[in-house]
Amino acid sequence: MWDDCYEGKSLLTPASASKLCLSITDVVTNWLKSFPEEIIPSILIRLPIKSLIRFTSVCKSWRSTIKDPSFIRTHLAHTLNFNDQNATHLLLLHTVFSQGLSYPLGVRHIVGFKQDLYSLHYDNNDVSQCCKVEFPIGLKEEMINPCFRVVATCDGLVLLADDLGLYAYNFVIWNPCVRKYVILPKPSVRFSTHGGYEASLGLGYDVIGNDYKVVRLTTLLEQQGMFDTCPTLAQVYSLAKGSWGRLRSDLPPCGMLPDLGQAFVKGALHWLAIRWEGDDVIFFVLAFDVGSESFREIMLPKTFKMEESLELRLSVSGDRQSIGLFVRFEDESDCFLDIWVMKEYCIEKSWTKLVILSPQGPQRSLPNALCFRRNGEVVLVLEDSCELVSLELASKQFKALGISGGQVCSVDLYEESLVLLDKKDAVSY
């Protein structure tokens, strides 16, 4: 994690710590200068991001090397490999503290907003160790709603959306590690142009085109909000081009279900979608291949019946090789949380139910599942206390993480990267 960012007491004063960091930087810089120029990149590739950012000021050749897109990609690959071998992955936690929530017309609104915080946590036994992330003040001035929502993370990038309540079109790709962000232009489908809609977003990497893409799917609510008669449109934003592509209507007939999670797996984005077949309501996973920009469908397990009280949420499996599904049901007669994983990606028969949870705690409340961890455990938030816990699936044992989730919270896998460092139009803060 970023240097000198843990909370708690330090043996060094801020002034002495700063002098020590500068001294170490000078030593490393002088050491590197003694090496032949041709081997410098292979040395730099092994250094942490904070050091690399400092080294961009050493000389023009180092700056050019560190900001080169191929170096940025190679450094990310090295980071991912190192983290896999040493179990040093991170989790990005976004917590929103408020008086409560309301759901007028089914849209989530934050009531009495107080503050929201971003922090990074090691995805290991001591998850409570954290680094607070400084949020760009300039973005706060652009918002219409009280705060942004974290839609997704990918290769150190965070996709933010200003859609917690009123219709708004502030979408941001943010790399807190290099302190840069890009504000996306307004998409074509807006309330002023198409009327009411339901929208789903996703962020993924196109390995063929070496490009990061934001996908926005909007279901137009034309016939009194009935999904079976409403068209769904797709639009793709390219970070490399800096613009949205043309509107597309070649999706399978479906309606989008917003705020139910998204998953980027095997080069494809995945969302939960719905369609009607006669009088039957069919839920399925809509997949979008980011490279070929083509759609396909993945069916959900057939062993549970879709009911109005059923709550679904999509996630990425613990090994990051497939998709997971959280199925939550709560009414006066029954209450449960099922956790599923598709063990073989795109193989419908491989859907496997890992665990069934009943209400927990003295209040007998049912927790909400947020995401899978790298070790296969699942992060849950307890409704009565807003505390985050980790569930070990085999034993059904809970482990307190020492973190409060607030009235709204999200937990996403995060990997440090230099992505956006080479973007001239990215805003620094």
Image (cartoon, grey):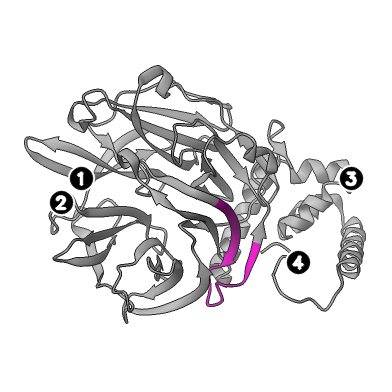
Q: Amino acid at mark 1?
A: Phe
Q: Report the Cα–Cα distance between label 1 and label 2.
A: 8 Å
Magenta span: predominant SS is strand
Q: Is residue 266 visible?
A: yes
- Local SS, label 4: loop
The picture quadrant where one finds residue 335 is bottom left
Which picture quadrant has residue 210?
Answer: top right
User: Where in the figure is residue 322, as x and y percent of width and height?
Assistant: 35, 56
As drawn, which residue projects farthest toward the top? 193
As displayed, is residue 67 above or below residue 48? above
Find numbered disc 2 in the image and state the secondary structure of the residue it sits on.
loop
Residue 123 position within the rendered picture, expressed as x and y whole percent measured from the top left: 53, 68
Query: Disc 2 versus disc 3: distance between alpha carbons?
Result: 61 Å
Over which residues does the magenta segment extend? 114-131
Q: Residues within 10 Å of mark 2 (few under 14, many from 20)?
A: some
Kindly report which numbered mark, 1 or 3, lies closer to the viewer in this rendering.
1
What's the mark number on residue 4? 4
**Callout 2, which amino acid?**
Met
Q: x, y percentage for residue 259?
A: 37, 45
Could you say which is closer to the camera, residue 166 or residue 288?
166
Mark nearer the N terminus (4 vs 3): 4
Front disc: 1 or 2: 2
Q: With respect to residue 63, does 366 lie above or below?
A: below
- The disc placed on residue 283 is 1
